[in-house]
Image (cartoon, grey):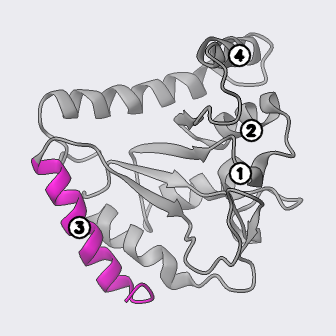
Amino acid sequence: YGADPAIVAMLARAFITAHREANIVTVAKHFPGHGSSRVDSHKSLADVSDNWQESELEPYRILAKDGMLDAVMIGHLYHPRFSDGAKLPASLSSRAVKALRAKGDINFGGVVVSDDLEMGAVADYPLEERVVKAVNAGTDLLVFSNVHFRDSELGPKLHALIADAVRDGRISRLRIEQAYGKIMLLKRRLAQKDLPGKW
């Protein structure tokens, strides 16, 4: 059934609806589609260039049109259509976020979430580069499992890294304000028990 976008969207809708009834935010993943990958992105970059199909976007289109998406996670996947080049994963590429936000297509206006930025698929990029690329790509919320780092100070370190990147111009203040606005809107909706509201 996983190859049928209508069934995928139907099952996702049931999952999202049940969670919304319990006032729980959901995150659809992994954009632009992990179904055709043959590699575990926990270990290395999944190149879906030869296997990915346009139909993998259809569940996102259906669910976004119906206001069913609270947040979307960008996967550590490589496809030239969703990459800024040089085998850069979608998770670090603005082309992926632009495709997700494109008016007249998916048109998702909510929170964009990274996949775990500790995973093997992005381990070749220094921590600072991963963070700056993800934020500049349009990611609003960065995920770190902290399983590998086991660093009790990881949060403050990431905050300082981002603040430094804003101060020296590698990340624009506007990008941070945009991300903050989207996250706060989602939090307000959650507090008001209004997750189905339009973006």
Q: Is residue 91 left or right of residue 197?
A: right
Q: Which residue is mark 2?
A: 133
Q: Position of residue 125 (x, y in %)?
A: 85, 41
Do callouts 1 and 2 mark residues in contact (Cβ within 8 Å)? yes
- Count residues near mark 2 (Cα–Cα under 10 Å), then give few for <14, some for 14-19, many for 20+: some
Number of residue marks = 4
Residue of label 4: 166
Which label was assigned to residue 93? Answer: 1
Residue bearing the label numbered 3? 13
- Mark 2 falls on what kind of element? helix
Task: Give, as a single range, the part of the protein colored magenta.
Answer: 1-21
In this rendering, the answer to whether 191 lies above or below 53 is above
Element carrying mark 1: loop
* Image position, residue 12 (x, y; %): 29, 68
Under circle 3, the secondary element is helix
For the residues marked 3 and 4, what is the alpha-carbon distance in whole angstroms? 38 Å
Please rate how many residues cluster around mark 1, counting C-alpha atoms within 10 Å: few if below 14, some from 14 to 19, many from 20.
Answer: many
Earlier-in-chain disc, 3 versus 2: 3
The crowding category of the residue bearing disc 4, from other C-alpha atoms within 10 Å (few below 14, some 14 to 19, many at least 20), is: some
- Of callouts 4 and 1, the N-terminal one: 1
Tag 3: residue type? Arg
